[in-house]
Amino acid sequence: MARLAKCDVVSIEDLTTAEVERIFVLADGFAAALAKGEPLDLARGLIMATLFYEPSTRTRLSFESAMHRLGGSVISSADMHASSASKGESLADTVRVTSAYADLIVLRHPHDGAARVAAEYAPCPVLNAGDGSREHPTQTLCDLYTLRKKKGRLAGLTVAICGDLKYGRTVHSLIYALARFGANIVAVPNRGLNVPDYVLDRLAAERSYTFSMVGMDELKSLAGGLDALYLTPSAPHQMALFTGGLPLEKLPSEQVPAALDAFYVTRLQRERRGENEGDAGGPSGYIRFDAQALKSSRTHEAVVMHPLPRTDELAYELDSDPRAVYFEQAAAGVPVRMALIAWLIEKAACAGSIARIEQPAEPPIKFKSEPAPRCANPNCITRHEGAYLRPRFRLAPRVSRSVLPLRCDFCDRELGAGFVGHARSRRYYRFEESLYGYARQWIEEGSLVVFDSEKQAEEHGYEPYRRGPQREIMNGDEVARACETLAAQLIEDLPDLSGVAMVGIVSHGAILAVRLRELIEARTKVRLPCAAADVVSGADAIRPLDAPGEFEVEGRTIVMVDDVINSGWTVQRAMAALWKHGRPASVKLAVLIDRGHREVPIRPNYVGKNIPTARAERVQVRLSPPEADGARKHHDRVVIYSMVESLKEPAKEPG
Ligand code: CP
């Protein structure tokens, strides 16, 4: 039996919270043993291979030191230019061959998603020592370990992460981990180097965690006033629910943290910048962190962290300050990585623990017809390996109104497909939200095709479905009457409104929920708590409309409100978001229009108006937002249109 479990650590999310805790316990033991100079032989007979396609000092040497300290051996390709990779050997072949020589592979690679590929091809465990700008999970273990040692906890800490948050792989892993351990993040990106959307989307979808960004100048000018701009997960803002944007938000004073607990400073990742990206303002335009930053009453307890190497962003004058812990972070690399190896040994010893990593809920999409989509990230490993490595996508967890969002299985970046096609009928559509359910059905059938343009679709022999003429089916007065009908139904059905709350699905369902609340209040004098469910922005979150304050779901009757159910997937996602928020006593669904058929078996309890439609017809609701009361009648309307098959245009006569 292999002495190490086939547990790959490609992302920090591959480790459960209990596993991270266990690694820290082991690291404490190894740190103590190292301090006493105790000889260890836990890994005697094991060989670790370090394959570094990019330079490294800390990660490679601390991994190698860790293995030696545990009594194991190391074989290393510290410069892959001197390996057969320079002759064109694929990553898949290199790791398969190396697995015959070693029990464990530690891989650093310049391309996003390389560690995932290595993990899939190598029969032995693969530890990601940094893949492109994607993740660096073992650095995060060192960061968390050091931070917790210094502060005694992780939950509730407030960490400002500064610098290149776009390409800094240590930052991405750290953000996922801090969110998981309940810390607050203040992101302070250098101009143009914000946390990428794919990281924010993953956080929002998997952890319902969002945060906003503060400019470096704003942070600097806030000496003594940091609390005024402090941003915390899921800050509510009523207008943002209707506009989709989350502006900077002031929080009520009781939620404001008194101080920052840590600064995590990062260097400019020059080696990852695209040719057209300039120099982030040049060295003078990049942050420079010095002793001044620690002088405010709100920062004087903060520790200063940096994954290293540093360039000019961190002043040497800080080195002698006891709050500067970056060399301790680097030193923690040995006991923490010893602990990781020991944990792999423990896992192998535990029956049934092998190959633990769970698959994401959505299976990969099988694209059976050409053109197969290609990842849009030029640094994705699928763009750099041979034809053996087929691009692979899953449906991204967020819903979009204008593109079908697919997530690359290797680099996590999103590919927004603007056009979707059906391989058997050879028709294509410009994507819109109401097609989401159809796209899911085609995925199940294996008949989904995606195109980046009409030109690409037509070059592959597909013909367009077109949007037929629009017909108004409800004007402003009729919409108002339908709202009255809904409000009356709700009041009649729910005589005790004390335990009732409303959740409108962004955006028109949220507008409708506010209107229904006004109508109910006018008749009963009861003002119902109201929230919005935003399944489009990626937040999948329930946000209160009555800021500030929490929106209570537990034990309540929730009236979920939407304008019209097309496929039913949006309502289903909103329901899932609601249940993540709390356990309601019951959920009722109110819709302005019931069109009579849908993909998902959802039946509304309250209907403003029944409008039977054909399957190829789409219903579109337009409602003016709540602050424009006077103009409501003119702007509210409901239209219907059909998706019609095109007739081939007759070829034009030349001349
Ligand atoms: N922090 C870190 O990854 O350093 P190296 O690049 O020196 O390994």
Image (tube, rainbow, N blue to C red):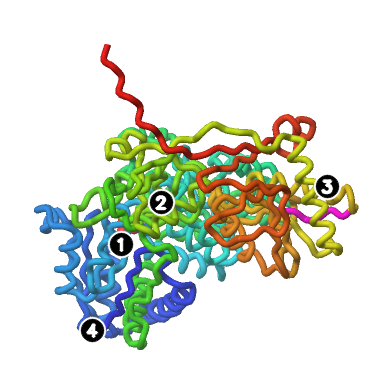
| Image position, residue 211 (x, y; %) | 57, 51
Q: Please identify the quadrant where the C terminus is shown.
A: top left
User: Which residue position is annotated with label 1?
Assistant: 116
Rendering quarter of residue 344: bottom left
Write down the region rendered in magenta: 526-531
Q: Which mark is residue 307?
A: none
The label nearer to you, 4 versus 2, is: 2
Percent coordinates x, y for residue 341 in the rendering:
32, 76
Residue at which label 2 appears: 406
Q: Residues within 10 Å of mark 3 (few under 14, many from 20)?
A: some
Residue at the (71%, 55%) spot, across then down: 590
- Disc 2 to disc 1, C-alpha distance: 18 Å
- Report the mark closest to the observer, 3 or 4: 3
Which residue type carries mark 2? Leu
Task: Name the residue that disc number 3 marks.
Answer: 519
Task: Give the Cα distance between marks 4 and 1.
Answer: 28 Å
